[in-house]
Image (tube, rainbow, N blue to C red):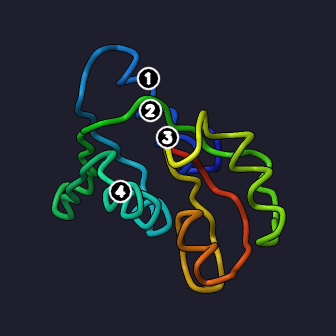
Amino acid sequence: MSQDIVADAINQIMNIKRAGKSELEIERYSKFLIEVLDVAKKHGYLDYKLDEKNKKLRIKIIKLNRCQAIKPRFNVSVSELEKYVRRFLPAREFGIVIISTSAGLLAQEEAYEKNIGGSLIAYFY
């Protein structure tokens, strides 16, 4: 395991998906990972429950084809964002790129609306 909790969790999600399963438990999580999962949950890709008593995060895959952490985490302005959306997503209006901005974690559409750039974190489709 690496030091990047978000990348590790997203890799575990894809490994479970490839294995044909739809649920997993993660023992290493952070507030930042939970915020990333909130954005994915808001767009309907997965659902999660935090079990604070046992310190485990249960994730259920709903409709997910692929997800991956973006490494290195590029800093992009709003004008450059379209280039990276085309690079990581297979088609227009299909999937989300999660961006860490000064207004919190946003999907690329919300970043366009608010005219804010930031650091690319992950993509889901």
Assign a secondary structure to mark 3: helix
Vertical placement of residue 24 versus 108, above or below: above
Alpha carbon of mark 2 to alpha carbon of mark 3: how far? 5 Å
Q: Is mark 2 in CB contact (under 8 Å) with mark 3?
A: yes
Q: Residue 104 versus residue 51: which sits nearer the camera?
A: 104
Q: Residues within 10 Å of mark 1 (few under 14, many from 20)?
A: few
Q: Tell me the residue at 52%/52% (across/down).
A: 96
Q: Residues within 10 Å of mark 4 (few under 14, many from 20)?
A: some
Task: Residue 53: give x, y in percent of width and height.
Answer: 16, 62
Residue identifier under label 3: 10
Q: Residues within 10 Å of mark 3 (few under 14, many from 20)?
A: many
Task: Residue 78: give x, y in percent of width and height.
Answer: 76, 72
Q: Tell me the residue at 55%/79% (across/down).
A: 104
Q: Horizontal placement of 123 versus 118: left or right? A: left
Assign a secondary structure to mark 1: helix
Alpha carbon of mark 2 to alpha carbon of mark 4: how far? 20 Å
Residue identifier under label 1: 15
**What mark, if any, has residue 12 been given in the picture?**
2
Q: Is mark 1 in CB contact (under 8 Å) with mark 2?
A: yes
